[in-house]
Image: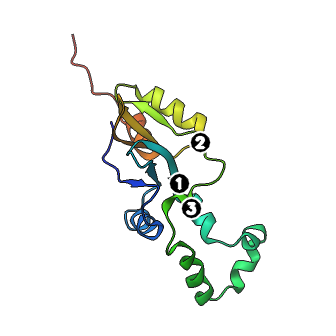
Amino acid sequence: MAEDFPLVGVEDDAWTAVTQLAENRLPGLVVTDPAGKPLSILPASQVVRILVPQYVQDDPALAGVLSESMADRVCDKLRGKKVEALIPDDVPELAVVNDDDTIVEVAAVMARLRCPLAVVMRGDEPVGVITASRVLQLALTPPPEQPPR
């Protein structure tokens, strides 16, 4: 059920991490501490919030008056920063599931935490990630037909 998924460290370059997020159209990134242990999920929506000035978030009508050069300067906010700078102060609880959890158990954790992905662990080691779209795919796949008895 788990899929391979990129992990980024808190000390990694923010620009590189966000580029990876965008180029691979990922719903988020798993952020690890310096020892490689999953620490947080950085949803793509959080990165978008960082790129848009607060006054534009407060009044989206102002977005229409921003020039493209202003948008370029907004992207410059990422240059020279570490991934750690992108993680909000109020870090949400990390969605973690075990590699033997059922689809219902995974869905319950993701729903409770409103998280687009969950880190799959085998003991203390991350073995992959389950995205919300993968949970939906599995939930919508009909079970195999049973042969008649």
Q: Nearer the viewer, residue 36 or 55?
A: 36
Query: In the displayed structure, would residue 36 be above or below residue 146?
Result: below
Q: Nearer the viewer, residue 30 or 81?
A: 81
Contact, mark 2 vs mark 1 (Cβ under 8 Å):
no
Residue 24 falls in image quadrant: bottom left
Label 3 element class: helix
Badge 2 crowding class, 10 Å Cα cut-off, few under 14, some 14 to 19, many 20 or more, is: some
Badge 3 or badge 2: first in the primary sequence: 3
Give x and y (percent) for residue 129: 38, 43
Contact, mark 3 vs mark 1 (Cβ under 8 Å):
no
Residue 92 falls in image quadrant: top right
Residue that mark 2 sits on: 114
Residue plotted at (46% across, 31% down): 106
Label 1 element class: strand
Give x and y (percent) for residue 3: 32, 44
Residue that mark 3 sits on: 85
